[in-house]
Amino acid sequence: MIKEKKIAVLGLGYVGLPLAVGLSSSYKIIGFDISLERVSQLLKGNDKTLEVKKEKLKSCLNKNLKITNDFNKISECNIFIATVPTPITKNNQPDFKPLKNVCKIIAKLLKKGDIVVFESTVYPGATEEICAPILENNKNKLKSGRDFFLGYSPERVNPGDRTHTIDKINKVISGENKLVEKVLKEVYSKLTVGKIFIAKNIKVAEASKVIENAQRDINIAFVNEIAKICNKLDISIFDVLDASSTKWNFLPFQPGLVGGHCIGVDPYYLSYKSTKLNVDPKVILSGRKTNDEMPIFIAKKINEKLKKGSKILFLGITFKEDVPDIRNSKSFEIISFLRKRNHKVELHDPFISFKEIGLIDFKKITNFSFDGIVLAVPHKFYLQNLSKIKKFLKPNGILFDVKGKFINKKKLDIKIWSL
């Protein structure tokens, strides 16, 4: 099969970069990305996703890791691992453009015996139905399963999570045959101290990934719906969750905004395939609808409790805590709603340069400036600076603590609204 493993990782974002860095401890790795800007940043040791520390990245670059935006430099590789994003369109349909484009690049380089592995989240069957035909459109007329081989190993990177890192998680792998499985088990065993689970086939591995995020989406949607009920009852969802969590088998999901490029996107891949199979994805789409409605529900509550034309400080515009990623962030829907109601909204996020999109400089905020403060994304920076944030409120101003980080804190001496 493959004696000397020469590995290329295509796509150096939240998934690809940690993967390339992790594998470079055991193999010579070439990381490829189409973005010259991204490659230039990484060659300087700067990872804007904050997933890999500068010292670690520079150390790897001085050893087994090379980074390039020239696909010809990965031509000698015999294992290609694609980690490109799989977004959705405006109509919530799968957008396979990045995946198709990376397949076209790999097709130009394919040789007999090569293995092509996909980590991108897709619906069950996509690797063989969408990727294989593009890969087979190569100059040497190589065929999948005969001349080159497919594999699938779903990514499990959780941005900002410093506990469940790529070197500790369990990894699911799958391949077109036993030899591919053997190679992938050897490769990924070098990456993680976690278990390697060999799925029955590629379609099973694809399904396992997409339902992981769909399940989380549905569970969060249930809690968001309960939050709306609690709001009508004038009780706190967080107080209810504290009580319910005392039962041994209660699942402590939290309410809030569901954005980003995984949980808010992947269920649409599953529902798309479900519809094609004539199975009505009622539960999946119901969860999506509930979570997609939460930004406006929260925005309306903020608008109801403030006077017209209020001055608002909006804290947190990334899609989750302590990450610099604003893709599919639901904060922008709340901001847009409030501005359309003639509120003056100032924005701040410690992970985004205030010069980039007109954010306010935290150091220049004066005391007693705002009628309301919306803590939408509770970065550690905000949790550690609550005493300062309190001073930004006018007398009788309201702190909208969306995720309930401060509702049970004593001696805050400010008005707080939460779900």
Image (cartoon, rainbow, N blue to C red):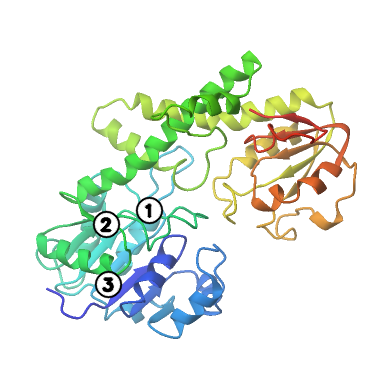
Q: Earlier in the sequence, mark 2 or mark 3?
A: 3
Neighbor class of circle 2 (other Cα within 10 Å; few <14, some 14-19, many 20+) is some
Rendering coords of residue 133 (x, y %):
21, 57
Q: On the image, numbered disc 1 is attached to which residue?
A: 156
The mark lying in front, picked from 3 and 1, is 1
Assign a secondary structure to mark 3. Answer: loop
Q: Identify whether 413 is placed above or below 119.
A: above
Q: Identify whether 397 is placed above or below 314.
A: above
The quadrant of the rendering that contains the N terminus is: bottom left
Q: Which residue of the protein is positioned furthest toward the bottom in this rendering?
A: 62
Residue closer to the observer: 154 or 98: 154
User: What amino acid type should be assigned to the residue bearing mark 3?
Assistant: Lys
In the rendered structure, the answer to whether residue 105 lies left or right of residue 419 reads: left
- At x 23%, y 77%, the residue is 5
Q: On the image, numbered disc 3 is attached to which residue?
A: 108
Neighbor class of circle 3 (other Cα within 10 Å; few <14, some 14-19, many 20+) is some
- At x 43%, y 26%, the residue is 247
